[in-house]
Image (tube, coloured by chain):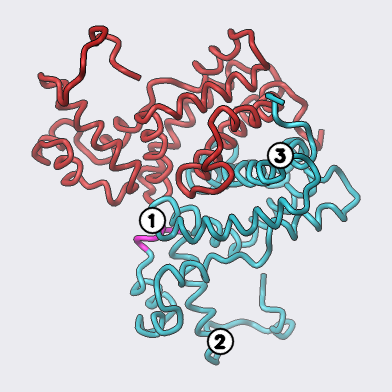
Chain colours: A cyan, B red
């Protein structure tokens, strides 16, 4: 998603001036490093190098690696917001609409990198897993607050884990057919599952 | 799952003798290291040290790290076998039975470590992701072969990714409520989803 303040037709050539653009540049570099190599390999040095700044500046801006990780992989949109948006749309079922929004959101490189950065880093580094647990916990609580059925906490977390599993298979491992299917087609298969989680009878034991 | 050749009532005290037990000891140590720290941190040295052998012996037995990884995280039971077992059982729906078998299978420490080793290693190391892609691809093809509906390949992969997402949330990130729920309770919530994937109408767009 481009910068909305860019002039129409302006060609973006490298770094923009000003202190906030340096911060953004570091965040972009960090997001890419966390997404591609995971926590251990995303060193202050490699991130600073990608951003064209001194490693000391990265430390000055963000303090600890854990804080840099949290800032770089924060996502601008929450599950609850997407779900509210899906509920307003009149076409198709709510599950299909939410699945479509999520798959569409993944097409944005920054969003995908933030998510992959979280997955790869949580998988190998407990400090990163702590950050991710807090981020996801907050999102799930908010998302569950929108649901009516019994055990909204379980429903919200199962929907999120189905999405996470697809992301892992599609982008981390590259499992077929999920790796090469069209995002829209995956969304159409996820729709009925999401409807089940959003409002269907779930617990077989009750 | 214990060794079926153990005498009933025999107490297993540490290492068993013979060359095959050294190999097993290395595999157990490797499985634990891959599960706990991921690919990068599971060094030949640390694995050899845990197994009480020389690092050169690990190399002699397994050659490359990729081969050691494949051997250590191979799982003795496949999705297709569990699914066939679930189909024979007469209690509950097939989805619930398969979910129960999978959650029960996770209670075994070796099985859980093999799976976590795959997840953590694939997330941070492309060479490990290649191994995992092959392993999962073979399992999914076999599993899909048991299904009747349209697009069994998509159904098999979505069921597997839902399970993987739960494993990731429960054991890697520790997301609530999945982290502390009873395995049987999680299975009862997964049952209807698995039924949908095994035999329900899925694709919303068709």
Determine the CA span between mark 1 and mark 3: 30 Å
The answer to which of B5 and B79 lies nearer the viewer is B5
Determine the CA span between mark 3 and mark 2: 39 Å
Position in image of residue A31 (x %, y %):
50, 67
Position in image of residue A169 (x %, y %):
53, 42
Main SS, magenta residues: helix
In magenta, the rendered stretch is A36-41
Q: What secondary structure is marked by label 3?
A: helix
Position in image of residue B34 (x %, y %):
32, 42
- Of mark 3 and mark 2, the one earlier in the sequence is 2
Residue drawn 67% across the image and 22% down it? B198
Q: Label 2 is found on which chain of the structure? A: A
- Of mark 1 and mark 3, the one earlier in the sequence is 1
Q: What secondary structure is marked by label 2?
A: helix
Asked where in the image residue B6 lies, by quadrant, the reply is top left
Check disc 1 and report the residue beneath it: A125
Check disc 2 and report the residue beneath it: A20
Q: Residues within 10 Å of mark 3 (few under 14, many from 20)?
A: many
Q: Label 1 is found on which chain of the structure? A: A
Describe residue B109's horizontal placement relative to residue B82 as left or right. left
């Amino acid at each position: 998603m481009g910068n909305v303040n860019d002039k129409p037709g302006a060609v973006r050539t490298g770094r923009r001036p000003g202190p906030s653009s340096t911060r953004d540049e570091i965040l972009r570099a960090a997001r890419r490093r966390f997404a591609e190599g995971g926590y251990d390999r995303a060193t202050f040095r490699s991130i600073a190098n990608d951003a064209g700044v001194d490693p000391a500046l990265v430390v000055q801006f963000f303090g600890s690696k854990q804080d840099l990780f949290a800032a770089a992989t924060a996502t601008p949109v929450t599950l609850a917001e997407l779900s509210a948006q899906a509920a307003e749309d009149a076409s198709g079922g709510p599950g299909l609409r939410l699945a479509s929004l999520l798959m569409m959101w993944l097409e944005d490189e920054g969003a995908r990198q933030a998510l992959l950065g979280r997955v790869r880093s949580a998988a190998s580094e407990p400090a990163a897993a702590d950050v991710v647990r807090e981020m996801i916990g907050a999102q799930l609580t908010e998302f569950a607050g929108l649901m009516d059925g019994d055990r909204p906490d379980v429903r919200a977390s199962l929907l999120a884990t189905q999405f996470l599993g697809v992301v892992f298979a599609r982008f981390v491992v590259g499992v077929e057919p999920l790796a090469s299917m069209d995002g829209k087609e995956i969304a159409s298969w996820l729709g009925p599952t999401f409807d089940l989680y959003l409002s269907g009878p779930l617990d077989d034991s009750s």
